[in-house]
Structures are given as C-alpha cells and as structure tokens.
Amino acid sequence: MTENLKDLTKVDLKNLDKIFYPKNKVTKGQVIEYYIRMAPKILPIIADRPLVLTRYPDGIEGEAMSFFQKNAAEGTPDWVKIKKIYSPTSKRDVNYIVCNDLDTLIWLANMAALEIHMPFSKIDNLDKPDLLFFDVDPEPPATLSDAADVSLLLKDKLLDLALTPYVKTSGRKGLHVIIPIEPEHTFEKTRAFVHQIGIELAKESDMVVSEFKDTKKPGKVFADYLQNSPLRTMVVPYSLRPTPDATASTPLEWSEVKKGINPSDYTIFSVVKRTGNPWKDIFEKRCKLEI
C-alpha cells in the first residue's frame, strides 16, 4: 500500500522513506500505512476526545528530540477539528486536536505523532469521565507476567462488582485495565474508587502496591490510579510506542492475559494481522458506577 498512500488522502504526505524505527527499518510510510489499517479500530475509541501527541520528527533515535504536543500547531489544516479548552495550570486556552476521521489520523501520523494519547472523558462532558483506568505497572524484577497475574485478580474483583473490564498491553512493560462507565461522577470520585480497589488488591496480594511512594520497590506491581484526573491521559488502543521493536498498545482478549505474555509479540507487523477486535463493543457495555 505504501507506494499508493498519496492517492488515499488529502494530506500532503512527505518523506515517506524516512526511517522511524532503525532496528527493523520501519519507515514513515509504513507507520502511516499501519494507522490507516488500524483506523476502523482506533477511530471509534478516540472520537470526540482531545488528544495529546508525542512526536518524533526524526524517528525514535533521531537527532531531533521527541516532544509532547497539546496545542495544535500553526498551519494545522482548517478541516482538522479543534477543541479550545482553558488550562488552569498555564492560564491560557489550549487548542486540542480531535480526531474523528481517517484524514486527521493520517495527518497525525504524517506529523510523526508515533504516540497518541487520550483522556478519559469527551469534549462535551470533560469533567465527567466515561472510562475508569488502572495502570498495572510492574517494577523489575517483576515482569509483564506478574502484571498479568495482578490484572486477572483485578478482573475478578471488578466482575464481582458487576463492572465490565477490558484490557490492553501498554506497549511497554505493563497492562492497562479499562472499564466503560456512564459519565455521572467527577474525577475526584472515580479516582478515589480506583484507588480503593488498588488498596484492596494490595491487602490480598503481597506483590501489589497501591501507593505512589511504593512504586519503585523492586518486584512489586503498582495498581496506579493517578491518571484518573481531568485531561490526564493513556496511550490510545493500537498506538505505536517508541520501542526498538515498534510495539503497539494492543487490546487483548482476557484469555490472552497469562504468564509468558511478551510486549514484543505485539508490534507494527503483528498487530495488523490480528483479526479480532476485543474492544469492539466497549461503549455498548457502559457500567453504572455505584459510589
């Protein structure tokens, strides 16, 4: 498809042969092709959410440093949807990019936005999250297999509460567990709920820690609740990560969460071959959170 990319979009594509992932010689064109192939799975998840980008203009090992981008850059096409949101921290308006269509997703990839991050609420209800987020993060020598064990404990606890959990790899060393909810509560309440679940897990398993001060204890798995805050983010499902193997944050079936799971099994090459879509119905199974 790479040689025909320019026929698929109104985006002015450039430098398609530039190497973004040197180890496997993955080019910019291949990155754009990947996002095109994954668009049917990505777009329904990120629709109507203000995005944060991590851009790598010269690839993951290039001379140009990577940088985060919240504010839409000068020269953003007028067909790209923008949401202006006031930032109390910087005391100014920030023009966030909203990606609801394929051309915008291609445009993001063309800007070398290898990583795309999304918040847990939508632009029409920013103060009320519609997703709960657990970052199950192992500290070496704990491994992704240990994170899998903890995630399965977490899954059982959530099911006992009549909540429907979904899971994905982070694309690095951990797993993300997400629960779709009705947007009825503040972030303060949902963060406290996620934190309490982590506290209960830590009582049940010596491997789990639930407090930030314990995150660097060797061999522990942190049930991280802190991202459940306004405009804090997670890497979006199927987003690439800046790893040598070009791994992707990949939605999984719960049956795939087991010992021996390896982030390098989920890459720009392998993920496109996955025929299932574990998160296909995620927003059709919103849970009512009783807190």
Image: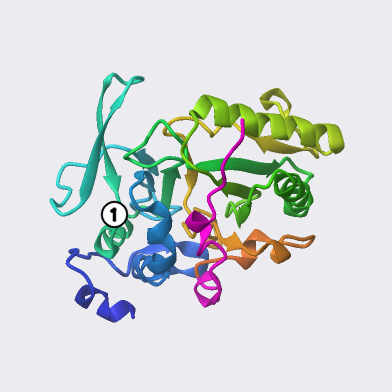
| Nearer to me, 188 or 32 | 188
Give the number of marks. 1
Across and down, in percent, residue 249 comes to 54, 56
257 sits left or right of 80 in the view: right
| Nearer to me, 33 or 91 | 91
| Nearer to me, 265 or 152 | 152
Location of the C terminus by quadrant is top right
287 sits left or right of 212 in the view: left
Region rendered in magenta: 269-291
Across and down, in percent, residue 38 comes to 42, 68
162 sits left or right of 25 in the view: right
Q: Quadrant of residue 141?
A: top right
Q: Secondary structure at mark 1?
A: loop
- Kindly identify the amino acid type of the residue bearing the numbered disc 1: Met
Residue 206 in view in this figure: no
Reply yes or no: does residue 279 show up in magenta.
Answer: yes
Location of the N terminus by quadrant is bottom left
- Residue carrying label 1: 111
Q: Does residue 20 lie above or below 162 as drawn? A: below
Q: Residue at x 70, y 23 (%)?
A: 213
Across and down, in percent, residue 109 comes to 33, 59
Residue 40 in view in this figure: yes
Q: Does residue 266 lie above or below 274 as drawn? A: above
Dominant secondary structure, magenta: loop
Q: Quadrant of residue 195?
A: top right
Q: Residue at x 49, y 53 (%)?
A: 242
| Nearer to me, 244 or 102 | 102
Across and down, in percent, residue 264 comes to 63, 63
